[in-house]
């Protein structure tokens, strides 16, 4: 009889089996491949619901575990963590995952790599669910790397496009830099505490009596992993480029789930972070700065997917900021609602992109609202939810974070409010420019029409979730039954609501009359616009570091190896041998007079030695 | 089973001898002989591997063949670590015969010599006597020299000069190294004639401990000797040109087996002789070489534009992880090295084999000429990508587990400089990703280039070889207990160094810095169950023998220092 514990492993391994079957057997059968992949994720969703209910009712769920690595002195067990945190995350990942799988049927129709796409998608689901269920650091790191590689494969899905191939490579490399810290952090925590297991660590860590420096180092190194995966400053550069992947991938991996894995991980190791107030502060400020920086860049972007990508960075910044303030419940709340409305927005953008035959510049769109009513309506819901408008889910989750800040860190509150205003502005800008007014480019937007049901149905489903997910604070209450919102009266909430609305209004003012391009904004912002347009030149700085600094170092190493080691070292040895050979050769040059000379010298030497 | 072991070692040698008598009808015949022979060897080695008793730590399938009286016996046998190397040699040997199609001249000689090469490696892993280990290793160098000089191609305008230079460099370096190693063995022989037998070594040395100076000298001589073949910095110079010049099968075998053989030699022969007093210095030297291999040679690898040279440099640079695992001087690091022997060997062979397939079809070696392989030949593209992902340590492949173990082992050493070396090692993983992903990006992705357009999918035989290597990496990566169950008792004590805790999981860790920061305690100097300050009572007893009786240390070398 299958217990809930067994079901946990079924949730995890069903997508792997699907991926394996697709890769090995059904690569040439697109329909079968899609059916396998979708079947696995729907099964996972159904089982996740069952687990969710079980956890809600307080039944303990213990998955069977097995010793995976036995070193004699150390054993690593393969186990699963099923608690409120992971039960919620399972539901989000499989739920959003299922809708996006279905959506992909429409979006990827006719693509030569249809089966490969679903294979990679299933591989991703496996890896992501592995992170959610991981019971120890090593297990988490394994899946952490696996989501990285599935993201790499999916960003570079259209690998013949050089930009896509480059973007995949960049994502992998930048994530590896974050993992550099993460892995060292894991080694440090494991060696200090004597275990990698989360449950044991959580109980043990505060009792070890470690020095503040060690605590800060451990927390900081682990945080590095989240900085890479959740694309926080200064490792945020890969996420906008990751938009080269197919839009369902952007929605699932680079908006709703994988990038949130960093936040999830931080919530999972809360015990580690709270032990070091300095690092908590660092985390909060990293998140806050990322939120502001990304939102301000989003203001100047023209590519609809890149606007959403910077928006994702910004919202992830909110979540990380919340973690840094100790408000992990709020962070997970926002993670959940964000997964719904950001997936919705991306899928809406995808629907537009299909209709416009892969045109992504918003200033070539316009007037889509009448031609694509369902897409417009759902995109509008997504925009309002992201902006934080009552009574949509984003309002509740974002305000939960803002209220937590109000209690703990006022400068960050200001920063977050400015970000909220910017968020309202750039989302309204995208919405107005793309959907309202007249078609700016008749060739592109003139003949658009609504996408098929397989595309719009997921939109509607996600739109419903984006509306209701925040009501009654159900999610934070599930995570933490004793959760209660910081109460500051309705006036404060009204103030919070006013800020994004101001952003909406400014955007309506600037773009409402059918602006052809960003000229007005450019004039208003002056040189700041150029700075934002170029994303603060962070990419250029990294290019300099990689090409000049590391490249220069590599060139120096090569030169040293060639000259010193090879030239002087080996050359020296062989030179010595040659010199010795030359000396000996002189003794036998074939000239009689030299032989005679040597003979005389020899006799003289012997005589001198004897007569001494 | 012990007979099977003897037969497995001797089979390639016997076939080579029989082959000599066969007239040179066609090259394909000898290739077939080599394929069938190595195929049988692989099957036999897997049978042996499967029959190893996992509950037992010691040597199995042992057989003794007296040679020079009682002192010098030809003893064969397998334990956990050498079994991994044995399977590795058989696997890579077999894959090499399937993939190495770039030899077009004097095929009879090549394939027969190759069989000798395989036999030598199998023998070196299976032999339990220091003298014969040395003999087999020397033998390998000699054969490798002949194969590179005779069949190599360097891909330069002036091929013949380059390849002879590469071959000469290989043989000069390797001979110099071998000479030092021989000197070390002779010194050891002069002090403790019985210690030549690896299994009697510990017992023999317990009776007559070596003077510390002699022990140090022996370890140093052996380390330098093996270090050459391992391509440890600064003895690495010969390796990249030699690998790059070697014909495919030989490149696979020398980067995939011979280097690992040297690491095995260090792990099994040199370090166990280490007197406890010199352990810190040895660890420092090994760690320094490891960092140089990983970073300095890694940076040089970044500069490579020639595909085969890139793979060659990467393989040389990755020897740093083997060194790092050795420097840890503890059980986890050693087990990491044991698994890494297998993982790094198979993945290097896989990369060289793949590159050989591409190069023989296109005749081009510069990466930039390629592009769009995944479109042109999807199978090759996928396998290339997987091979690279394995080499950069993706979970699921054995490389990942072995790297984690090596890094963990070195981290547990505890000293600040060792932790910095670990940090360098982790940064090396970033470097690896940089150069390997760049290679994948160039070769597999992007539009199909003119050069790539000449590539066709490999034959079924070659596909089989590639898949076989991948399966090897997968098997040990998904279920690492295949390897660690065999090695977990192999290092109850690390030579003269104290054992790392009993079976208690926390033991090994708690011995380390409870402050988490930095302590300069000697490696793994304590166990949780023993009272504090018991450095002299460290037990060499592994978890297997008597974890329940920790207070009564078995007499071992630790007490004799």
Image (tube, grey):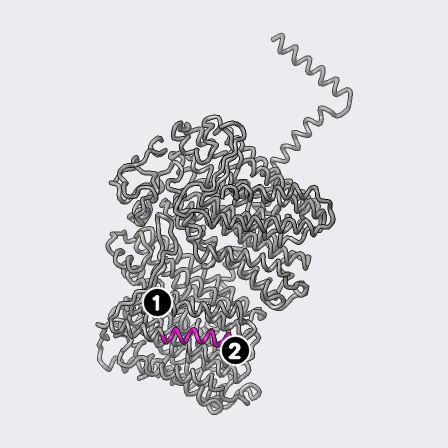
Residue A409: quarter of image: bottom left
Give the mark nearer the N terminus: 2 vs 1.
1
SS at circle 1 = helix
Residue A475 locus on image (x, y percent): 29, 76
Residues packed near mark 1 inside 10 Å, few (<14), some (14 to 19) or many (20 plus)? some
Q: Which residues are magenta?
A: A31-46
Left/right placement of residue A598 relative to residue A404 reads right
**Alpha carbon distance from label 2 to label 1:** 29 Å
Q: Main secondary structure of the magenta part?
A: helix
Image: A84 above or below A340: above
SS at circle 2 = helix
Report in which chain the residue with disc 2 lies.
A
Q: Which residue is mark 1?
A: A6
Residue B533: quarter of image: top left
Report in which chain the residue with disc 1 lies.
A
Answer yes or no: is residue B235 visible: no
Q: Is residue B429 magenta?
A: no
Image: A326 above or below B323: below
Residues packed near mark 2 inside 10 Å, few (<14), some (14 to 19) or many (20 plus)? some
Q: Which residue is mark 2?
A: A31
Answer yes or no: is residue B50 visible: yes
């Amino acid at each position: 009889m299958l217990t809930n514990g067994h079901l946990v492993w079924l949730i995890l391994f069903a997508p792997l089996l699907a991926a394996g079957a697709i890769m090995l057997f059904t690569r040439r059968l697109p329909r079968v491949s899609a059916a396998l992949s979708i079947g696995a994720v729907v099964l996972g969703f159904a089982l996740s619901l069952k687990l969710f209910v079980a956890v809600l009712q307080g039944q303990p769920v213990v998955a069977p575990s097995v010793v995976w690595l036995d070193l004699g002195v150390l054993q690593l067990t393969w186990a699963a963590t099923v608690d409120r945190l992971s039960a919620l995350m399972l539901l989000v990942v499989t739920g959003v995952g299922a809708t996006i799988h279905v959506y992909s049927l429409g979006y990827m129709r006719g693509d030569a790599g249809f089966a490969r796409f679903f294979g990679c998608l299933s591989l991703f689901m496996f890896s992501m669910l592995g992170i959610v269920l991981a019971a120890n650091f090593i297990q988490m790191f394994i899946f952490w790397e696996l989501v990285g590689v599935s993201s790499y494969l999916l960003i570079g899905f259209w690998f013949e496009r050089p930009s896509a191939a480059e973007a995949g490579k960049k994502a992998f490399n930048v994530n590896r830099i974050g993992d550099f810290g993460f892995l060292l952090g894991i080694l440090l925590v494991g060696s200090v505490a004597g275990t990698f297991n989360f449950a044991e660590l959580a109980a043990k860590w505060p009792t070890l009596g470690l020095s503040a420096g060690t605590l800060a180092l451990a927390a900081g190194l682990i945080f590095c992993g989240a900085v890479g995966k959740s694309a926080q400053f200064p490792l945020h550069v890969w996420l906008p480029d990751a938009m080269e992947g197919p839009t369902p991938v952007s929605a699932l991996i680079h908006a709703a789930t994988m990038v949130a894995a960093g936040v999830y991980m931080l919530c999972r190791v809360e015990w580690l972070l709270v032990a070091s107030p300095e690092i908590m502060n660092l985390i909060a400020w990293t998140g806050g700065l990322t939120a502001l920086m990304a939102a301000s860049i989003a203001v100047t972007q023209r590519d609809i997917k890149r606007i959403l990508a910077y928006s994702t960075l910004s919202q992830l910044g909110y979540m990380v900021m919340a973690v840094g303030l100790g408000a992990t419940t709020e962070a997970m709340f926002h993670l959940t609602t964000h997964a719904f409305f950001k997936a919705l927005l991306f899928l809406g953008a995808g629907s537009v992109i299909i209709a416009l035959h892969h045109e992504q510049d918003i200033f070539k769109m316009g007037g889509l609202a009448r031609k694509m009513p369902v897409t417009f309506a759902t995109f509008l819901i997504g925009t309002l939810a992201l902006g934080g408008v009552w009574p949509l889910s984003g309002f509740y989750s974002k305000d939960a974070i803002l209220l937590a800040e109000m209690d703990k860190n006022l400068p960050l509150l200001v920063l977050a409010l400015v970000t909220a205003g910017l968020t309202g502005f750039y989302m309204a800008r995208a919405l107005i420019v793309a959907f309202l007014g007249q078609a700016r480019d008749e060739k592109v937007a003139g003949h658009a029409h609504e996408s098929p049901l397989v595309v719009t149905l997921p939109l509607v489903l996600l739109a419903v979730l984006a509306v209701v997910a925040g009501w009654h604070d159900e999610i934070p209450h599930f995570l933490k039954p004793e959760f209660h919102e910081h109460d500051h009266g309705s006036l404060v909430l009204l103030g919070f609501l006013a800020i994004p609305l101001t952003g909406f209004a400014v955007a309506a003012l600037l773009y409402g009359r059918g602006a052809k391009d960003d000229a007005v904004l450019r004039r208003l912002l002056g040189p700041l616009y150029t700075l934002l347009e170029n994303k603060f030149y962070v990419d250029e700085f990294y290019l300099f570091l990689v090409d000049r600094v590391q490249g220069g170092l590599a060139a120096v190493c090569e030169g040293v190896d060639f000259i010193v080691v090879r030239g002087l070292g080996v050359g020296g040895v062989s030179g010595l041998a040659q010199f010795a050979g030359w000396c000996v050769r002189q003794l036998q040059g074939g000239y009689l007079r030299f032989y005679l000379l040597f003979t005389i010298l020899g006799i003289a030497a012997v005589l001198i030695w004897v007569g001494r | 089973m012990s007979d099977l072991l003897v037969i497995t070692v001797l089979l390639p040698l016997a076939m080579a001898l029989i082959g000599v008598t066969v007239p040179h009808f066609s090259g394909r015949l000898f290739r077939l002989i080599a394929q069938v022979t190595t195929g049988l060897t692989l099957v036999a080695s897997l049978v042996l591997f499967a029959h190893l008793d996992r509950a037992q730590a010691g040597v199995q399938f042992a057989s003794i063949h007296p040679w020079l009286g009682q002192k010098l016996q030809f003893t064969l046998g397998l334990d956990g670590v050498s079994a991994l190397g044995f399977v590795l040699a058989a696997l890579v040997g077999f894959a090499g015969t399937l993939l190495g199609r770039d030899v077009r001249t004097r095929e009879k000689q090549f394939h027969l010599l190759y069989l000798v090469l395989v036999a030598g490696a199998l023998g070196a892993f299976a032999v339990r006597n220091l003298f014969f280990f040395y003999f087999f290793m020397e033998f390998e160098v000699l054969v490798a020299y002949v194969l590179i000089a005779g069949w190599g191609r360097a891909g330069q305008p002036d091929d013949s000069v380059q390849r002879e230079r590469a071959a000469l460099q290989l043989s000069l370096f390797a001979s110099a190294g071998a000479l030092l190693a021989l000197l070390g063995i002779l010194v050891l022989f002069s002090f403790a004639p019985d210690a030549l037998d690896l299994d009697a070594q510990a017992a023999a040395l317990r009776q007559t401990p070596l003077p510390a100076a002699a022990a140090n000298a022996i370890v140093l001589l052996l380390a330098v000797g093996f270090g050459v073949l391992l391509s440890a910095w600064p003895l690495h110079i010969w390796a990249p040109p030699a690998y790059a010049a070697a014909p495919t099968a030989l490149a696979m075998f020398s980067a995939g087996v011979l280097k690992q053989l040297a690491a095995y030699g260090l792990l099994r022969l040199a370090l166990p002789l280490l007197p406890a007093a010199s352990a810190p210095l040895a660890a420092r030297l090994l760690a320094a070489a490891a960092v140089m291999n990983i970073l300095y040679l890694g940076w040089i690898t970044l500069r490579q534009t020639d595909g085969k040279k890139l793979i060659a440099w990467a393989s040389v640079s990755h020897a740093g992880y083997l060194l790092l695992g050795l420097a840890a001087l503890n059980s986890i690091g050693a087990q990491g090295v044991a698994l890494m022997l297998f993982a790094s060997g198979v993945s290097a062979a896989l990369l060289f084999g793949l590159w050989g397939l591409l190069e023989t079809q296109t005749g081009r070696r510069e990466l930039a000429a390629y592009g769009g392989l995944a479109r042109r030949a999807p199978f090759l593209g996928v396998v290339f990508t997987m091979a690279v992902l394995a080499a950069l340590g993706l979970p699921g492949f054995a490389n990942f587990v072995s790297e984690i173990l090596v890094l963990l082992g070195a981290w547990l050493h505890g000293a600040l400089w060792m932790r910095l070396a670990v940090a360098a090692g982790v940064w090396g993983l970033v470097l690896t990703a940089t150069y390997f992903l760049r290679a994948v990006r160039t070769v597999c992705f992007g539009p199909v280039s003119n050069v790539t357009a000449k590539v066709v999918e490999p034959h079924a035989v070659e596909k089989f070889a590639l898949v076989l290597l991948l399966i090897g990496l997968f098997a040990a990566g998904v279920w690492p207990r295949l390897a660690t169950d065999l090695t977990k008792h192999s290092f109850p004590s690390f030579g003269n160094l104290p054992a790392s805790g009993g079976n208690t999981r926390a033991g090994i860790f708690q011995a380390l810095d409870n402050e988490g920061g930095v302590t300069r305690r000697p490696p793994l100097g304590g166990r949780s169950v023993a009272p504090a300050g018991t450095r002299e009572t460290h037990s060499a007893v592994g978890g297997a023998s008597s974890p329940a009786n920790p207070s009564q240390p078995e007499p071992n070398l630790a007490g004799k220092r």
